[in-house]
Image: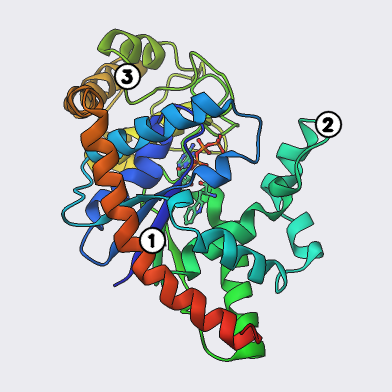
Amino acid sequence: MRVFSGIQPSGDLHIGNYLGAVKQWVNAQSSDALYCVVDLHALTLQIDPATLRTQTDDLVAMLIAAGLDPATCTLFVQSHVPYHAQLSWLLECVATYGELTRMTQFKEKAERQDGYRVGLLTYPVLMAADILLYQTEQVPVGDDQRQHLELARDVAERFNNRYGAVFTVPVGVQPPAAARVMDLQEPTRKMSKSVASPLGTIYVLDSADDIARKIKKAVTDTDGEVRFDWEHKPGLANLLELYSGFSGESPSAIAARYHRYGDLKGDLVDLVVTELTPIAERYRELRSDDVALRQLANEGSEKAEAVARQTYRRAAEAMGLQ
Ligand code: ATP
Ligand code: LTN
């Protein structure tokens, strides 16, 4: 089963990224899985060049620390493989302006700034290129990427109908719990790398003390009943989803075992700290050797490029390029 997914080096990894995406990637890794640090996507918003460079190395190290094994799967950096940008252009001539302007994430991000970049609009086409270059069957992503994935499927089908069967049509896969982790302080907004919310976001590299403080201060409600109910008790539902993401038990089964918010929060702190502490330790080791890290990423890029080249050539020829 060919698996592909990507993540932007746009800030520190939080537990939403970890549970929604990275943990699924680790479980799905095989010689047929490719995972990509999508640095080209990070250019759609303002980012300092030196920061982008550092965050790309940070994220490669973080993904290995979280359990991706570069000897098993292919881990690489998007801009190292030129076919992503090249196929993206071809697909921009298949996707329509109307479908891109309808993307929720584009509308939200464009609203927050003046003079937003064209790349913010065309970003889902680049994402489609990422996926389609590898004849991907499954794309493990969080819930917020569903609409972008649907676009990738539409573009693949339209291309195949118009120019001949070149692309596999991919499907998105979400984890059973924690596919959309919400901000701990504002449980109606998703936890996000690029929105600063110091108490609302738990980072994978947070200290045990910070994790405890953030979970203890997480917003709940005043009725005091432990029950899994997103509509009426979003803060508590979010904590139950997190608990489920870390333990594998279902949110309702977890809720049934607790009577007090404080007890639930205390056990959640232990679960999170136990899983994240060894990741942070491995991360620090890996990050202390830049040369070895870059070497691993370069090897991944070579493997990816060999696959991407073939699909790109087929797509270009099908469209009439010589
Ligand atoms: P940004 O705020 O810069 O958009 P992000 O935190 O949304 O960043 P991405 O790099 O866009 O992170 O996403 C990487 C992966 O993490 C994607 O598969 C995405 O669906 C998933 N993801 C992001 N935020 C969450 C969340 N709050 N809950 C679950 N999954 C998430
Ligand atoms: N748009 C995604 C990141 C991303 C991605 C991909 C995910 C870029 N290319 C290909 C899956 C497959 C996001 O999380 N913001």
Residue found 55% across the figure and 34% down from its top: 190
Quick check: 281 above or below 181? above
Instruction: Provide residue 208's location: percent of width, then percent of height.
Output: 26, 13
Q: Which mark is residue 18?
A: none
Instruction: Provide residue 286's location: percent of width, then percent of height.
Output: 21, 29
Question: How crowded is the residue under tag 1: few (<14 C-alpha within 10 Å), some, or many (20+)?
Answer: many
Q: Three-letter amino acid code at disc 2?
A: Asp
Q: CA distance from mark 3 to mark 1?
A: 34 Å
Residue found 46% across the figure and 22% down from its top: 201
Q: Read off the residue under disc 2.
A: 114
Q: Read off the residue under disc 1.
A: 4
Instruction: Provide residue 255's location: percent of width, then percent of height.
Output: 32, 34
Mark 3 or mark 2: which is in front? Answer: 2
Q: Is mark 1 within 8 Å of ligand 2?
A: yes
Quarter occupied by the N terminus: bottom left
Secondary structure at badge 1 equals: strand
Q: Residue furthest front?
A: 322
